[in-house]
Image (cartoon, rainbow, N blue to C red):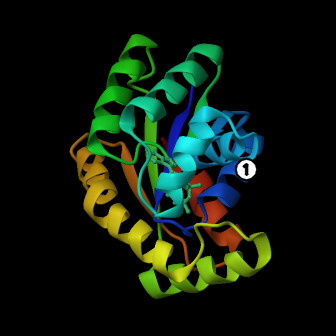
């Protein structure tokens, strides 16, 4: 059973690659960002709370996010999973370790990191702002999202680098297909 974390900065291409991987490997998919945007669209109480934080480029609280992941994994107990946008803090990664142990997935985990230089990320996010109109894709908020990524999420990469044979990096600046081929090679070999 494959359990995959797709890791990378905002704009690295996690969403697009996830959708292709989910299809190829028949995985259950969760994007915490997508769930939150849906909550906002449906004006739920969680959505109203999350919007305020997200529009500033900050993170939603670990409790809320871990609750979402716990539900998701419970519902998909017999399937491999792909996590997009989670874990984003070391606390979330530690909580995930427990969930994976409890569901006997801990020895079937791959963390795939999509690496893209910051200037290219900024360019992509500003372009996405024109196309999709996400309210957090403006220059000010993007800067804060990078800041959160560097201070809170990069330590998550270190957390997984310490585990043997779990963490792999892929170049995310070529074409979508090139990155996809590399991701698949790593998944097939491990
Ligand atoms: P991006 O990859 O561009 O950062 P996402 O859709 O993954 O976009 O996330 C959008 C926003 O949702 C984040 O900036 C954050 O506010 C919130 N969010 C998503 N996932 C998490 C998480 N695991 N922990 C905390 N906040 C999250």
The crowd level at tag 1 (other Cα within 10 Å; few <14, some 14-19, many 20+) is some
Q: Secondary structure at mark 1?
A: helix
Asked where in the image residue 162 lies, by quadrant, the reply is top left
Q: Nearer the viewer, residue 144 or 90?
A: 144
Q: Is residue 36 left or right of residue 9?
A: right
Furthest-left residue in view? 162
Residue designated by label 1: 19
Residue 187, visible in the rendered structure = no
Residue 25, given in percent of the width and then of the height, sits at 70, 38
Residue 37, given in percent of the width and then of the height, sits at 66, 48
Residue 33 in the image: above or below residue 118: above
Q: Is residue 129 left or right of residue 100?
A: right
Q: Nearer the viewer, residue 135 or 185?
A: 135
Residue 139, visible in the rendered structure = yes
Query: Residue at horizontal 53%, vertical 46%?
Result: 50
Asked where in the image residue 181 lies, by quadrant, the reply is bottom right
Residue 97, given in percent of the width and then of the height, sits at 33, 27
Query: Residue at horizontal 43%, vertical 66%?
Result: 145
Q: Is residue 100 left or right of residue 133?
A: left
Give the mark count.
Answer: 1
Residue 35, given in percent of the width and then of the height, sits at 65, 40
Query: Residue at horizontal 33%, vertical 37%?
Result: 93
Residue 36 in the image: above or below residue 153: above
Task: Respond yes or no on whether mark 1 lies under 8 Å from ligand 1.
Answer: no
Indicate the quadrant containing the N terminus: top left, top right, bottom left or bottom right: top right
Q: Is residue 38 left or right of residue 160?
A: right
């Amino acid at each position: 059973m494959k359990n995959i974390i797709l890791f990378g900065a905002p704009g690295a291409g996690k969403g697009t690659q996830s959708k292709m991987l989910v299809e190829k490997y028949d995985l259950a998919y969760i994007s915490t960002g997508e769930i939150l945007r849906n909550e906002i669209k449906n004006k739920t109480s969680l959505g109203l709370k999350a919007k305020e934080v997200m529009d500033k480029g900050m993170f939603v609280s670990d409790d809320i996010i871990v609750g979402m992941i716990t539900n998701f994994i419970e519902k998909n107990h017999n399937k491999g999973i792909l996590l997009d946008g989670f874990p984003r803090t070391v606390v979330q990664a530690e909580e995930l370790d427990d969930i994976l142990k409890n569901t006997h997935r801990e020895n079937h985990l791959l963390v795939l990191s999509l690496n893209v230089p910051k200037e290219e990320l900024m360019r992509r996010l500003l372009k996405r702002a024109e196309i999709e109109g996400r309210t957090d894709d403006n220059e000010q908020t993007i800067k804060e999202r990078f800041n959160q990524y560097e201070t809170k999420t990069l330590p998550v990469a270190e957390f997984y680098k310490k585990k043997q044979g779990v963490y792999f990096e892929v170049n995310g600046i070529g074409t979508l297909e090139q990155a996809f081929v590399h991701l698949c090679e790593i998944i097939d070999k491990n």
